[in-house]
Amino acid sequence: MKRNLYPNDYVESTYVIDFEKLYQEGYRGIIFDVDNTLVPHGAPADERAIALFQWLHTLGYRVTLLSNNKEPRVQQFCEQVVGAEYIFKAGKPKPANYRKAMERMGTDADTTIFVGDQIFTDVWGANLAGIRSVLVKPILPWKEEIQIIFKRFIEALILGGYRIYTRYGDTIQPVPLRKES
């Protein structure tokens, strides 16, 4: 159970990941959480998110936004970025919609990577679906719904264990990082 809560990697931000190198490694699909992964909770797509999605589209990625949020929130964000699909009210951490996203993108667990900011929904679900999971630090961790804030305290304990696990674990897969961030 503990291993399902540990990401394959933990990085500062979505925007430091070198997606071009991941593409060269054979990844063709990316599943993203939205809030606090790409933009602050509830915020529209900003210039940085729009530029990222344009770049991912240029590289040839298929991208799906997977969110437990309601459709208006996810649809609005999706309309602001290039070449993404979305699944709302995804029921994360249940793996069914991770699999549905891969099916839509024409990818599988070996060619898909997941990026999100929460352990109990994002990482756990990606791991249950067999997808390489990358946890990012939340953009604004204390500007969230109260139940998410409470979960952040438990996540901090899990991340303490994760730091020890990274020394001895065999499932850590560091993602390549961009040189300039």
Image: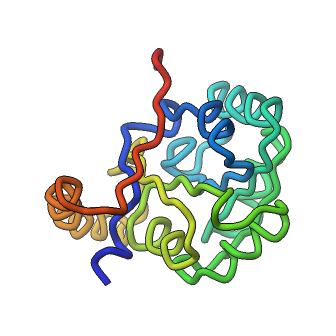
Q: Compared to 156, does 89 lie above or below?
A: below
Q: Is residue 68 left or right of residue 139?
A: right
Q: Residue at x 31, y 62 (%)?
A: 170
Q: Is 144 left or right of 18, judged from the image as shown?
A: left
| Percent x, y of residue 41 | 51, 50
Q: Give the side of residue 104 with respect to residue 116, left or right.
A: right
Query: Residue 120 location in percent, x, y?
Result: 40, 73
Q: Is residue 29 above or below residue 171?
A: above
Residue 165 is left or right of residue 42, and the answer is: left
- Residue lying at the far top in this picture: please name it: 180
Percent coordinates x, y for residue 135 in the rendering = 42, 53
Foreground: 1 or 77? 1
Q: Nearer the viewer, residue 20 or 91?
A: 20
Q: Nearer the viewer, residue 99 or 76?
A: 99
Question: At x 47% / y 15%, what residue is drawn?
Answer: 180
**Observer-nearest residue: 171 or 97?**
171
Residue found 33% across the figure and 51% down from its top: 142
The quarter of the image holding the N terminus is: bottom left
